Image (cartoon, grey):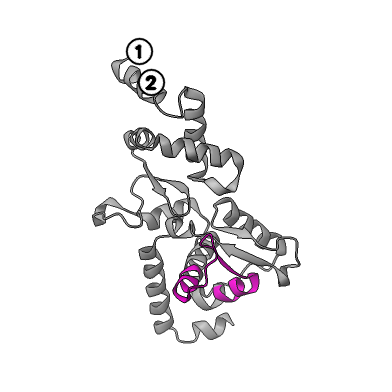
Amino acid sequence: MSRFIDTFHEELERTPLHGLRPFQAVIHRLLAHGILVADDSQTERQQYEQSVSAFPLLRDWFEIAGLRLEHYREFRYLRLYPPNARIPGVHQDEEEHSDAAVLRERYSPMEARLLLVLRALYDQALTLGNLGDKGEAGLPLGDVFTAMITMSNTPMPEAAGERDRLFKRMKRLKAIDYVSGDAPESERWIAIRPMITTLVSGDLLADAIRRLEGAQAEDPTADDDAH
């Protein structure tokens, strides 16, 4: 083996991730999902605690691959950012990021709009101080449907199955959780999780709002038509 690999193994053995299998399990989870949340399962809690103890090694490993690993201590999660992604709270030159392109590549147009609306709703709850103990914003599902129209001029899909698919996708992204998932849709509540702030940047949200306001200024009847 090369000297680099030998040194890597020596450093790995000094961390709670000693041995390749635990290290690979964390790498595979982050590459597959882009996020690791301590409170979501026993497996994730164990991997999170191991990862935090070995964070410099993990961060360097991803940096070699052109990726960036960030640790959000307040809500106990790690997020892996792709190349050229805009990272909240980290100064970057304009040419260093292209998160709008990343958003278009990773999500369907409806998923992207829903993510932007969820981020806007989360910011509203944050401003009003209406967050739970874990930083989540709870609200009726109907409020999200209304916000999709008022904020993005886009109604939710008519088919219930398509709406369910969208929200299951948001849950897999750890953007939301269900508060009353078994209730009828008209009575259902969701919790928008603080992870939405690192999934959709504030700058991207501001750009989307400016575009929407510009479109409404050009066509004042657009909002009425959406209703």
Q: Earlier in the sequence, mark 2 or mark 1?
A: 1
Residue beneath the point at 64% across and 69% down: 141
Report crowding for label 2: few under 14, some 14 to 19, many 20 or more residues within 10 A (C-alpha).
Answer: some
What distance separates the C-alpha of mark 2 from that of mark 1? 11 Å
Q: Position of residue 100 (x, y in %)?
A: 39, 58
Query: Could you tell me the amino acid type at mark 1?
Result: Met
Residue beneath the point at 50% across and 72% down: 125
Q: Is residue 127 above or below residue 108?
A: below
Magenta segment range?
122-147
Residue beneath the point at 69% across and 68% down: 188
Tell which residue pokes out farthest to the top in this image.
1
Q: Looking at the picture, tell me which residue is in the foreground, 211 or 192.
A: 192
Q: Which residue is disc 1 drawn over?
A: 1
Describe the element under mark 1 as helix, strand or loop. Answer: loop
Q: Position of residue 25 (x, y in %)?
A: 52, 31
Describe the element under mark 2 as helix, strand or loop. Answer: helix
* Disc 2 + disc 1, Cβ < 8 Å: yes
Q: Which residue is disc 2 drawn over?
A: 9
Query: Could you tell me the amino acid type at mark 2?
Result: His
